[in-house]
Image: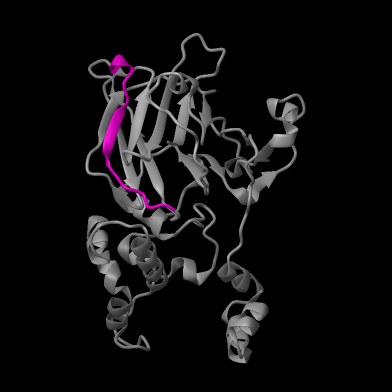
Amino acid sequence: NLFILDLSSPPDAQAQEYMSLWYDIQNQRFNVLTSASYRNEPTCFPVSPLRHGVWHHVLLSYAPPKRPMLSRKAILGMFVDGRPLEAEVRVESVNLPPNARIHIGVPNPNLAVSGYVRGTLPPWEVGPTLMLATLLSSLDATAMFTSGPDFQGMFWGDRPQRLSLAATGTAAFAMLAESGEQGSVAGALRRREIPRLEAAGTVNRERHGGPNGTGSHAVSDSLAALSLLFNVSPDVVLFGFRASSSHSYVRSGSKGMKLSRFAKRLVNVARINSFKEDVSTDAIVYGNGSVISPSCFADNIQWVGGPSILLPIVNAARSPKSLASGGG
C-alpha cells in the first residue's frame, strides 16, 4: 500500500479524529478511512490502475457538508493524472483541530493495527506537495498534470515555454502515452475536457493566419486559450513543500533533533512573507530516505541562456558523446 495522506488530531487530544487515504497496489484502487466511518471500514474509489515507474499526479478534493445539522456526509473527489475518477465518495465528516498533524508516506497508527492494510511499505518518490484552502475544478487538476512534476504553482516565472500551449500539448502527449491509460491519447484528452489540445499547434497557426502569424485574427500561443493557465493564489496555500526548499537545520528541542541522523527539514514556502495564522509549519522528513532536488537538462540550459546556448552546442557536436559532454 502507498500511504498518500493522513490527517489526524495530535496524540494528546481527547478524541482521536483522523482521515487516511492510501492506494492498494494489489487491488489497484484508492481507499479512504475516517475515524467516524461506519463499522470502521474503508470506503473504496473505483479501480484506477497506476503504471509502475511513471510519474503520476494525484489530487484530492474535500467538500464538507453544507448543512451539518441535516447530514454529516462530506464529499471526496479524486483526480488521477488530471482525470476525475468515475465516482465521488461520501464519507463521514471529521472535526480536525487547527493543530492537526499531516503524515505522508506512513499509515495512521489506528489504521496500521486495524488489519485492513498489510505487508511492507514499498519505496516510492514524492514530488512537490500542495495543500490549498479552496476547491479546484477538473480543469485545474488537468492544468497541474500537464505542467508535469515541475509545476510551479504560485511561482510560474517568466519562461515562455511554461506558458506555451504547443509546448504543453507536446509534453502532455508524452505523459499520457506513458501513463498506461486505456484508449488513445485523443480519448484521454476528451475525458479531460480538452480535446482541442490535440491540434493546439495547427489551431494556433490557423488563427494566426499562417506560419508567420500575420492574419487579422491572431492570438497568442498561451495556455489561457484552453483554460489551462492555473495560478495558485498565495492566500489559499496552507503548505507547499518542495525538495529544493529542504534544510539540514532542525529546531532544537524538537523530535527531529533527537533523530537528527535521520531527519531533515522541509521549508513551507507558503510561509515566506506570509502573515496568515492558518499557514502550516515546516515539515520534518524522518527515516533514511533522501531529499533530492534534481535539475533536468532543459532547466539547466534555460538558466544559462536558453536556445542561444543550446543550438550552437548541437551544431558543433559531432557525436552523441560530444553532445552529452557539451550539454553537461
Q: Residue at x 24, y 66 (%)?
A: 186
Q: The N terminus appears in which quarter of the rendering?
A: top left
| Residue 65 showing in the rendered view | no
x and y, in percent, of residue 159 in the image: 53, 68
User: As displayed, is residue 278 above or below residue 177?
Assistant: above
What residue occupies the far top of the structure in this picture?
Answer: 14
x and y, in percent, of residue 321 in the image: 63, 82
User: As displayed, is residue 220 above or below residue 21?
Assistant: below
| Residue 274 showing in the rendered view | yes
Residue 241 part of the magenta segment: no
x and y, in percent, of residue 218 in the image: 32, 80
Count up the numbered dots.
Answer: 0
Question: What colour scheme does the image use?
Answer: one colour
Instruction: Say whether residue 253 is left or right of residue 83.
Output: right
Q: Residue at x 40, y 39 (%)?
A: 134
Q: 296 or 66: nearer the eye?
A: 296
Instruction: Say whether residue 65 is left or right of residue 11.
Output: left
Instruction: Say whether residue 267 is left or right of residue 147.
Output: right
Quarter holding residue 62: top left
Please state the extent of the stretch shown in magenta in the rendering. Answer: 38-52
Q: The C terminus appears in which quarter of the rendering?
A: bottom right
Q: Residue at x 56, y 70 (%)?
A: 298
Q: 182 or 293: nearer the eye?
A: 182
What residue occupies the far front of the structure in this picture?
Answer: 119
Quarter holding residue 207: bottom left
User: As displayed, is residue 19 above or below residue 47?
Assistant: above
Q: 155 or 54: nearer the eye?
A: 54
x and y, in percent, of residue 72 in the image: 28, 19
